[in-house]
Amino acid sequence: MNEETKRGIRRARWVPPFVGILLVILVVFTSTQHAPTVRLPDGTEFRLTMAAFTNSYSYTRKLAPAWVLRYSKFIPDFIERRLVKGAGTIGMGSPAGTNLMVAFDVLNTNGRPSRISWLRIRDTDDNAFETYGQRGEISSGSAFSQIWVVSELPRRTQKLQLEPLVMLPDGRWTNIGPFQIANPFFGKFPQWKPKPLPQARTNDGLTATLTKLIAGSPTSSVAQGAPASPANPRSTRMEFSFSESGKPVDHYRIHHLAIADATGNKWSPYLNINGGRGGWSTNGATEFLGALWPGEDAWKIELQALRNADFAETEIWSPPVIPLPNAQTHDDLTNRFEVDGLSIHLANIEAPGVEVTDSWQSIVRYWGQESSVYALGVMFDEDMRDRRLVLVGAEDQRGKPFKLVEQRGADYPQQALFLQAPNGATELHLKLAFPKLKKFEYLAHPKFIAE
């Protein structure tokens, strides 16, 4: 046997092991379950990168070659650390309990990407549950990540389906799910027994009657104008009437709502008295994004009502005239008022566009688009108990009204009033009141509107 033949035999011995290694690599890598990806007609790609039940509330966007992210669990940590770079971390809310945390990486190389606007949860009986969740975003160049943290979920079903809802450029809604996950909150729970509507409750002379409770309506402000579609976000609507001594009154409004079920869910919808995409409230009527889950026989509704008009002169505080600050100026104030053992003072006023760097920076910073909006910082020196601040009137030196754009932190001792000034205003004349909250509780079953 010559030398050339021997070398050929030795090379042939390596063929089976080499082929075997290739087959193992092929099987391992082609069977890997990579992150689900959805591509929309406008070129936007959504990749589900996390769906976990956690209390960490933290997510880091990763930048790395696609193959590294796809086969991450097969790559040793010391190698992956060299290949993957962090592109921003976001932490949201309080880690007080276990929550569903969902993260999507979003990319569109053709232009402006679409965004997830709402997250719907569906059970195995095809019942949808839409509740408000915290959301955040991490940007990195032309791509970004969207993060949702949801605390309220159906707990009577073993599996859950995630349905992220996206509004397309033409105004239509589309569902880029579903993505199925196990439900760690699954269990057997009692059912509450509802009472028929209308339900009347009385507190300190005020009667508040729940007259209407509807869930699943597609008529919320965020969906108006969009073509009808099962993907449209749904809303919940409640209506209350108020009376004193048997006579209807209209000087009370919904200040706060809390909604709970027998499985442990409880949350408060965001209500904007001036309207908004998340929800609105006008006196005794409110509608907010989020359709209740039909799997509950009854929902507990906790209402806080607050007087907002028809105050006696003795109930109104008219502080001294406040000169409007010059552009980009912050003025400290010392005006103080005492009521029911509480001490309240006007702490500062900020001109439009001013940047504050002290403890007020997150309270008085205005993020809206309106012009000529002044921020008035208000401080309760101690716990507010059941008192709340109500703006009775705001005028300039000519009697022209300011518009209340937002009241931020209304349930907290440190809060702000955002007031849009009329043209030519140089002074702010205020009338403030500090009425008590009236609290009521109901157990009711909604009228559900089918999708």
Image (tube, rainbow, N blue to C red):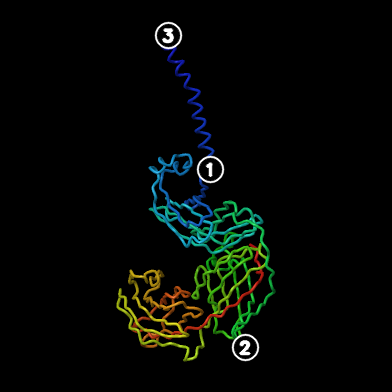
Q: Position of residue 439 (x, y in %)?
A: 57, 78
Residue placed furthest toward the top: 1
Q: Earlier in the sequence, mark 1 or mark 2?
A: 1
419 to the left or right of 263: left
Residue 247's tag is 2
User: How far across and down, in percent of the image, does residue 120 sit?
Assistant: 57, 59
Q: Is residue 312 above or below residue 276?
A: below
Residue at mark 1: 33
Nearest to the observer: residue 274 or residue 57: 57
**SS under mark 2:** strand
* Drawn side of residue 259 relative to residue 6, left or right: right
Where disc 3 sits, the SS reads loop
Query: In the image, what residue type sits under mark 1?
Result: Gln
Q: In the displayed structure, does residue 279 sit left or right of residue 414?
A: right
- N-terminal of the pair, mark 1 or mark 3, is 3
Look at label 3 and name its amino acid: Asn
Distance between the Cα atoms at labels 1 and 2? 65 Å
Q: Is residue 86 above or below residue 256?
A: above
- Going by the numbered disc 2, the residue's amino acid type is Lys
**Residue on which disc 3 sits:** 2
